[in-house]
């Protein structure tokens, strides 16, 4: 999940003026086009435009146009500015933390009526074909459990490992449990003198560490950062830092990927969407590395965290809203989700992809190509409640405080719990 600036004061004014979820009186920026603000570039953008062209060719009415609008943060800023101007694109990519604020401003079209529409909706069989987690993350409990966005690009947190470094340490199998992970980090350090893990401080990774320990991050409006699972995750970071088994990379960098490719570390944790980039850095030597589910407290009951943006449809005109939904439905069809996955590295979000011949052929080309797809069945989404974006910043501050020795794991857990609860109480008030 991407970090975005908080614009709480702006949205408080908007909510006061418009009312949560009420009619907002927005107009489309492009009345003659169904404008879709996206951030895909290069090959991904070419593929997206091809999918859009195919959709437009098969129907009459206003054409959909995918428009590159910067990164996620820039799109967020553009949408908030557009809300102020009361003129919006038909749809845009958005993370849940962004969508919450758009909902509060009355700018989002709930999708439930489209999904159940007898002409353009999805049947129960079609809905059952989606992995439950990719739909659940788009339902917002604070707003009556409405489906306020729909899945777009999805990936999961994975463990990447360098086989050559592990072999130097006498290790032939990557860890399945957190206990094994720590022991292998110690073995790599003692036998090779290398750091075992380059640490990218990231809130989603930390949430995944909690989920994989059987824990949770929130219950109702109260966070659970003082729970045993959360404390254990912070204690692991504390141990890695104290024993010099891992080091923190600069925020926003990809130094961990470079270090893995240069045989300087054994492990990194990243989204499965990084698989292609790591492969390129390995210069095609697929025997040097692998990717698997993150370590677990109990491998028989695994969990990981789900990544990736969704698509929001905005209140513009009934025609634009309906065409937007039809595009979203087409984009997430079984054939297109496989096409998108094979072309971009994101995961197919339909269960039926397992039986698609092109998907099966791709999985056969490398023993780890299917690993991320197999995690979708036990992936969990992060909270989509108001204030969670600010909580994410607090999570990352807590991790950094532990890694730099400014806080013990216990101190960081207690501080994080208190600060996060205060943020959610204010956001929900």
Image (cartoon, grey):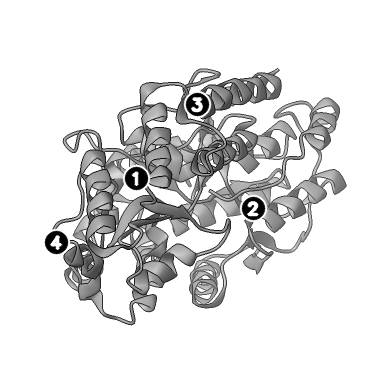
Q: Position of residue 181 (x, y in %)?
A: 25, 46
Q: Position of residue 76 (x, y in %)?
A: 70, 51
Measured along the vertical axis of the image, is residue 120 above or below residue 39?
above
Closer to viewer: mark 4 or mark 3: 4
User: Going from the N terminus, do you reach mark 4 or mark 3 first?
Assistant: 4
User: Going from the N terminus, do you reach mark 1 or mark 2 first?
Assistant: 2
- Of residues 286 and 362, the one nearer the viewer is 286
- Of residues 386 and 46, the one nearer the viewer is 386
Which residue does the image show at 66% across and 25% down from the upper left?
A: 423
Q: Which mark is residue 91?
A: 2
User: Going from the N terminus, do you reach mark 1 or mark 3 first?
Assistant: 1
Please give the residue where the numbered disc 1 appears in the rendered image.
130
Which residue does the image show at 85% across and 31% down from the upper left?
A: 13
Closer to viewer: mark 3 or mark 2: 3
Q: What SS does tag 2 mark? A: strand
Q: CA distance from mark 3 to mark 2?
A: 38 Å
Q: Position of residue 298 (x, y in %)?
A: 20, 33
User: Going from the N terminus, do you reach mark 4 or mark 2 first?
Assistant: 2
Q: Which mark is residue 170?
A: 4
């Amino acid at each position: 999940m991407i970090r975005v600036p908080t614009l709480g004061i702006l949205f408080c004014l908007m909510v006061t003026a418009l009312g949560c979820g009420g009619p907002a009186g927005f107009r489309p920026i492009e009345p003659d086009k169904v404008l879709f603000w996206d951030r895909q570039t290069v090959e991904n953008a070419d593929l997206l435009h091809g999918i859009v062209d195919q959709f437009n060719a098969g129907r009459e009415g206003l054409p959909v146009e995918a428009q590159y609008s910067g990164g996620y943060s820039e799109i967020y800023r553009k949408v908030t500015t557009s809300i102020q101007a009361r003129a919006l694109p038909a749809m845009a990519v958005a993370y849940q933390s962004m969508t919450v604020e758009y909902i509060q401003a009355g700018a989002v079209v709930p999708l439930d009526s489209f999904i159940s529409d007898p002409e353009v909706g999805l049947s129960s069989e079609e809905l059952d074909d989606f992995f439950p987690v990719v739909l659940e993350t788009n339902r917002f409990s604070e707003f009556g459990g409405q489906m306020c966005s729909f899945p777009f690009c999805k990936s999961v947190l994975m463990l990447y490992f360098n086989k050559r470094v592990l072999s130097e340490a006498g290790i032939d199998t990557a860890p399945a449990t957190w206990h094994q992970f720590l022991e292998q980090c110690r073995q790599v350090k003692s036998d090779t003198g290398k750091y075992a893990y380059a640490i990218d401080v990231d809130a989603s990774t930390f949430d995944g560490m909690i989920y994989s320990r059987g824990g949770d991050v929130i219950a109702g409006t109260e966070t659970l950062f003082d729970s045993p699972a959360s404390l254990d995750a912070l204690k692991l970071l504390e141990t890695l830092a104290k024993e010099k088994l891992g080091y923190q990379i600069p925020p926003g960098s990809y130094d961990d990927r470079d270090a893995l490719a240069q045989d300087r570390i054994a492990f990194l944790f990243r989204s499965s969407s990084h698989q292609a980039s790591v492969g390129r850095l390995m210069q095609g030597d697929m025997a040097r590395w692998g990717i698997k589910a993150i370590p677990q407290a109990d491998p028989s009951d695994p969990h990981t965290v789900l990544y990736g943006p969704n698509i929001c449809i905005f209140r513009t005109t009934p025609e634009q809203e309906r065409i937007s939904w039809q595009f979203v439905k087409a984009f997430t069809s079984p054939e297109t989700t496989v096409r998108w996955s094979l072309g971009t590295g994101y995961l197919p979000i339909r269960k039926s992809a397992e039986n698609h011949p092109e998907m099966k052929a791709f999985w056969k080309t490398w023993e780890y190509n299917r690993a991320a797809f197999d995690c979708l069945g036990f992936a969990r989404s992060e909270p989509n409640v108001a204030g969670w974006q600010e909580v994410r910043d607090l999570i990352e501050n807590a991790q950094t405080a532990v890694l730099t020795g400014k806080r013990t794991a216990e101190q960081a857990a207690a501080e994080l719990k208190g600060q996060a609860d205060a943020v959610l109480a204010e956001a929900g008030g």
